[in-house]
Image (cartoon, helix red, strand yellow):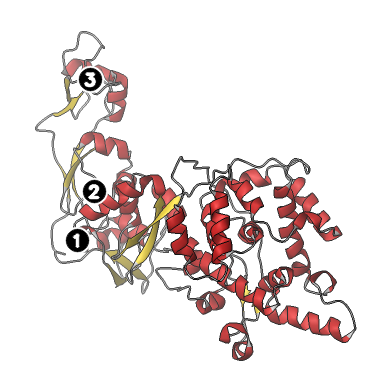
């Protein structure tokens, strides 16, 4: 958690002056692991990252050394500069016992951190900073970019709004840079580097200042100096949270340095990047982006938590993070995406008598698209005067409804695929095995690959009744949103239609609804 005062701005470091940073440890739910075999960043790319940093040579040596590191943990250990193992202090011992008494702690937090940790480690190496700093988001947020504290601190590094703005982390109704994994990491390392200079290279004092602010630490040093007492971190009287903050980080470093000695089990984290950055120039529905990358919307959102409306913000460009193993596919799909597939959003003020269904019909968007754009739950109600974000261009608002329920004048045909059986086909299409057998005069349940089956809409043999519906794709639609609205599976929509890599507004698709 980070905050500051106006007076400090006039005299502090960075010519702007920061007063307080306060950390907030949380224990949010973890995500499943996503280990992938992916290529490492090249040394040439790393050198471009290093640029003209003062510790460039040191950083380059660290990157070269990291090429042979078998795991990400060993790479982190190689970069330890604070010598946590030789620091003997009862406050560290206490915090270490807390970690080791929770055997599942590292398993739970590492499952989520492996999406982001490699990137943080590389940025720290590029600057020649201690790798202990890569552990700070464990203490601050349990490596959860959606962590939010009671003091309005957000993100991996727990910036509060004012300090986030000071470090150019933009925050508006579309985007919160404090939750942007890459932007917030750069901001946090900038701030930590400045604190280190402010306290003459003493990293423990810099870390304490990250938690309670440079003014807080400076006053404690001045007080001890006046009393003739030592002014190192361990002898300062600081807020209780700050008294525990640095020991927490050092205790974690000790456990990671010697996990066997402390009875800890560290999950294997590969020394490989998880995501790639792709520049997005225009607004794009994140569900559409997930389709282009062939990943779930949940995975894409976990990599891009800064976007608050489930769509990239209108003021681009932005860096969208996608799994590196899907990056080439995503870039190719993006290059083929027609201009009409990008989204523009418009504000709509709810009027008396409005319902979501009426608004959706009037502006030719789906109810689910409105709910997604406004982060609304299934039972959310709208209020008079409420502002809704509506996707689309609204050029043809008087078009008739795009859902047309049609009688099955022409029976649906299905081509048998490898691995198909009658039971699976019947279940996917809401029919019974008896109906399919009868309508196709099958004498045996054995099917041939390539065989054409007739699937009638009405099952008179006691099974369910399916209704064939033609749906016209609207701006803002995705396979995910259509499947959710009509309560069908995405794979079934693909089975029923010959679909390309993306959906296009105006495209008609067939749905089979019960």
User: Can residue 21 be seen from the camera position used here?
Assistant: no
Residue hosting label 1: 339
Distance in Å between CA atoms under marks 3 and 2 = 34 Å
Rate crowding at label 2 as few (under 14), some (14 to 19) or many (20 or more) other CA atoms within 10 Å: some
Sequence-earlier tag: 3 or 1: 1
- Residue found at the far left of this picture: 409
Q: Is residue 322 above or below residue 343?
A: above
In this view, the residue in front, 398 or 423, is 423
Q: Are marks 2 and 1 in contact (CB under 8 Å)?
A: no
Kindly identify which numbered label has been placed on residue 502.
Answer: 2
Sequence-earlier tag: 2 or 1: 1
Q: Is residue 193 above or below residue 480?
A: below
Kindly identify which numbered label has been placed on residue 435.
Answer: 3
Q: Is residue 215 left or right of residue 355?
A: right
Q: Quadrant of the N terminus?
A: bottom right
Q: Secondary structure at mark 2?
A: loop
Residue at 75% x, 57% y is 84
Rendering quarter of residue 216 = bottom right
Q: Secondary structure at mark 3?
A: helix
Task: Give coordinates of residue 483: x percent, y percent.
Answer: 31, 44
Q: Is residue 17 left or right of residue 256?
A: left
Distance in Å between CA atoms under marks 2 and 1 = 12 Å
Task: Give coordinates of residue 123: x percent, y percent.
Answer: 53, 61
């Amino acid at each position: 958690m980070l905050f500051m005062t106006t007076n400090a701005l006039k005299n502090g470091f960075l010519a702007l002056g920061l007063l307080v940073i306060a950390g907030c440890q949380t224990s949010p739910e973890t995500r499943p692991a996503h280990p992938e075999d992916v290529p490492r960043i090249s040394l040439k790319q790393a050198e471009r990252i290093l640029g003209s940093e003062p510790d460039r040579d040191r950083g380059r040596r660290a990157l070269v050394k990291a090429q042979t590191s078998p795991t990400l943990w060993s790479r982190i250990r190689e970069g330890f500069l604070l010598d946590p193992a030789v620091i003997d202090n009862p406050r560290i011992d206490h915090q270490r016992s807390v970690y080791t008494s929770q055997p599942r702690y590292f398993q739970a937090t590492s499952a989520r951190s492996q999406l982001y940790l490699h990137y943080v480690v590389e940025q720290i190496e590029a600057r020649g900073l201690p790798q202990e700093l890569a552990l700070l988001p464990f203490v601050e947020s349990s490596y959860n970019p959606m962590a939010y504290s009671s003091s309005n601190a957000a993100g991996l590094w727990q910036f509060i709004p004012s300090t986030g703005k000071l470090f150019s982390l933009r925050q508006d109704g579309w985007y919160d840079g404090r939750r942007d994994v890459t932007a917030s990491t750069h901001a946090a390392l900038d701030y930590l580097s400045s604190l280190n200079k402010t306290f003459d290279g003493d990293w423990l004092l810099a870390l304490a200042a990250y938690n309670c602010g440079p003014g807080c630490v400076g006053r404690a040093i001045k007080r001890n100096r006046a009393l003739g007492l030592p002014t190192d971190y361990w002898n300062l009287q600081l807020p209780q949270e700050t008294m525990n903050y640095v020991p927490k980080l050092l205790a974690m470093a000790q456990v990671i340095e010697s996990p066997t000695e402390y009875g800890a089990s560290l999950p294997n984290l590969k020394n490989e990047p998880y995501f790639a950055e792709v520049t997005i120039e225009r607004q794009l529905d994140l569900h559409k982006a997930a389709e282009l990358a062939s990943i779930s919307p949940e995975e894409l959102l976990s990599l891009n938590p800064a976007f608050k409306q489930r769509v990239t913000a209108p003021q681009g460009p932005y860096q969208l993070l996608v799994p590196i193993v899907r990056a080439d596919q995503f870039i190719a799909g993006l290059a083929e995406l027609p201009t009409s597939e990008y989204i523009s959003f418009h504000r709509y003020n709810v009027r008396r008598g409005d319902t979501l269904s009426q608004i959706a019909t009037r502006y030719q968007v789906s109810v689910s698209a409105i709910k997604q754009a406004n982060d609304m739950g299934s039972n959310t109600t709208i209020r008079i005067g409420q502002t809704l974000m509506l996707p689309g261009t609204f050029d043809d608002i008087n078009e008739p409804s795009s859902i047309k329920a049609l009688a099955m004048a022409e029976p649906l045909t299905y081509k048998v695929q490898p691995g198909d059986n009658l039971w699976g086909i019947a279940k996917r299409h809401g029919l019974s095995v008896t109906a399919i057998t009868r309508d196709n005069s099958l004498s045996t349940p054995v099917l041939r690959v390539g065989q054409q089956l007739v699937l009638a809409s009405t099952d008179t043999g006691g099974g369910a009744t399916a209704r064939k519906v033609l749906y016209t794709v609207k701006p803002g639609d995705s396979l995910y949103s259509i499947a959710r609205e009509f309560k069908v599976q995405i794979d079934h929509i693909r089975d029923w239609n010959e679909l390309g890599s993306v959906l296009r507004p105006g495209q008609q698709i067939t749905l089979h609804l019960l």
